[in-house]
Structures are given as structure tokens and as C-alpha cells.
Image (cartoon, helix red, strand yellow):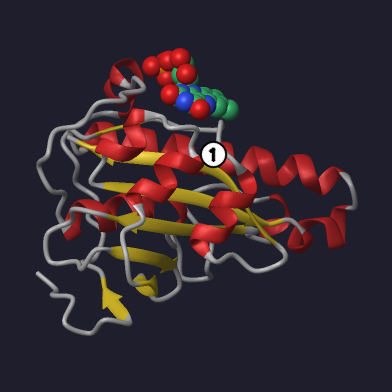
Amino acid sequence: MNSATNREIIKLPEPVFNGGISVEKALAARRSVRNFTNEPLTLSELSQLLWAAQGLSNSSGLRTAPSAGALYPLEIYLMAANVKDLPAGVYKYNCQKHVLVKTGEKAKSAELFDAGLRQGSIKSAPMVIIICAVYERVTTKYGERGIRYVDMEAGHAAQNVYLQAESLRLHTVAIGAFHDAKVKKILDLGETEFSLYLMPVGK
Ligand SMILES: Cc1cc2nc3c(=O)[nH]c(=O)nc-3n(C[C@H](O)[C@H](O)[C@H](O)COP(=O)(O)O)c2cc1C
């Protein structure tokens, strides 16, 4: 198990490919769940979920979710409140290196709960995956139509998280109702980066 002694970059455990549940079973069992226990998640679980969302799945850099023109506009953030061997804080997933980069010192559960229209799932979750996007990576090539491509892609990534969570016997919910500007501030997003989904995950 990797430890998070380096506060800036956290190397994640390698993803594994031998989950014990079929795609059909995961699809049939998948549900949005909004209440979580106090049990912490592990770095392995977190690693697997981030890889499912946006990890590399081939040596040329293609990823687990399809992407129009393979332009990859999505950026995945993590608000970790209760993950074993990981200090609470805000992190960004670097999929090329499969590492987390710390971007904020505090977990910010209360702030995210407020930004998420006080939905209880955000407050009770040991961690929240936040799917963000840089639209201009796609609109530069596809014009206005690129906006819908990016939104579609976020759906692919979110479904990957749902199915991976199912396989790990974890639960999640895709949250689209939140205050954009507040989430942008909490994550300290750049001018061109926008949040699309909050996904609390837990047991
Ligand atoms: C675009 C989108 C936005 C959603 N936003 C929220 C939300 O803000 N809060 C929430 O609790 N669930 C949200 N959901 C989850 C839906 O409520 C849920 O998928 C629906 O009730 C069907 O239940 P199931 O996912 O268990 O099949 C959202 C789902 C989608 C696709």
C-alpha cells in the first residue's frame, strides 16, 4: 500500500482487472445511493474508481471512457474526507501518471455540501469525485457542437464510476444540482474549467 507521506503527489495503487462481478450484474444492480456509513474508503478503492472514470487503458494514451476526437476535455478532482492513508484534502487526478496531486489542504465537506444545495449524500460521503471539463479543448475543433460532446463524455465517465463502484461493493450518486460558482471556488478551478458532476462515494 502506498502511503501519503509526500503531501503534494500521491502515487496510487495500480488498477486491477479481475473484479468479481460481470458487467451485466453491475448494470442490473446499479442504483443511486445517497446514504453512507462512517467507514473509510481505501486508496485501492479510490484508485480503481478514478481509473474507471478517466484512467489510461492503452499505451497510446486512450482512456476508459470514449472521447470525441480523443481530445479528452475531462479533469477529475477528488474531495477526500475519510480515506485510509490519504490526508483529507482536495486533489486532482493525473491519469497519465496515475497519481493524485494535492490542490487543497482541507476536506471542504461542509463547503461542498452547501454548494451542492445541502444534499446529505455529499456530507456523509468519505469522498466525492468531481467531474470537470475544459470545453475549449473540444470546441476549438468541433465548434458549438463540441459542448454537447463534452457533456456526453461526462456521462460516460460517470457511468464508469457507477459500474466500478458496484463491482467494489461501494455506492455512489451522480449529482448535477449544485451551485457552479461555489464549486469552482472550492476546487480553485481555472478560468476555462467547469464542474459537471459531483459523485459522492461510500459504503
Ligand atoms: C444528469 C443527472 C443529474 C442528477 N442529479 C442528481 C442530484 O442532483 N441529486 C441526486 O440525489 N441525484 C441526482 N441524479 C440521480 C437520479 O436522481 C437517479 O439516477 C434517478 O433517480 C434514477 O435512479 P437510479 O440511478 O438509482 O437508477 C442525477 C442523475 C442524472 C443523470
User: Is 156 on the left-hand or right-hand side of 168?
Assistant: right
Compared to 31, does 114 lie above or below? below
Number of marks present in the image shown: 1
Furthest-right residue in view? 143
Q: Quadrant of residue 121?
A: top left
Compared to 165, does 80 lie above or below? below
**Considering depth in this image, is 16 or 50 the residue closer to the camera?**
50
Placement of the N terminus among the 4 image quadrants: bottom left
Compared to 95, does 44 lie above or below? above
Q: Secondary structure at mark 1?
A: helix
Q: Amino acid at mark 1?
A: His
**Considering depth in this image, is 61 or 152 the residue closer to the camera?**
152
Compared to 160, does 102 lie above or below? below
Q: Position of residue 20 (x, y in %)?
A: 16, 36
Q: Position of residue 98 (x, y in %)?
A: 36, 70
| Residue at image mark 1 | 156
Q: Position of residue 153 (x, y in %)?
A: 62, 43
Q: Residue at x 37, y 34 (%)?
A: 162
Q: Residue at x 12, y 48 (%)?
A: 40
Classed neighbour count for the residue bearing mark 1: other residues with Cα under 10 Å, few (<14), some (14–19), many (≥20): some
User: Is 55 on the left-hand or right-hand side of 24?
Assistant: right
**Considering depth in this image, is 97 or 87 the residue closer to the camera?**
87
Q: Residue at x 28, y 53 (%)?
A: 48
Can residue 34 be seen here? The reply is: yes
Q: Residue at x 31, y 23 (%)?
A: 33
**Considering depth in this image, is 202 or 59 the residue closer to the camera?**
202
Can residue 198 be seen here? The reply is: no
Placement of the C terminus among the 4 image quadrants: top left
User: Is 172 on the left-hand or right-hand side of 117?
Assistant: left
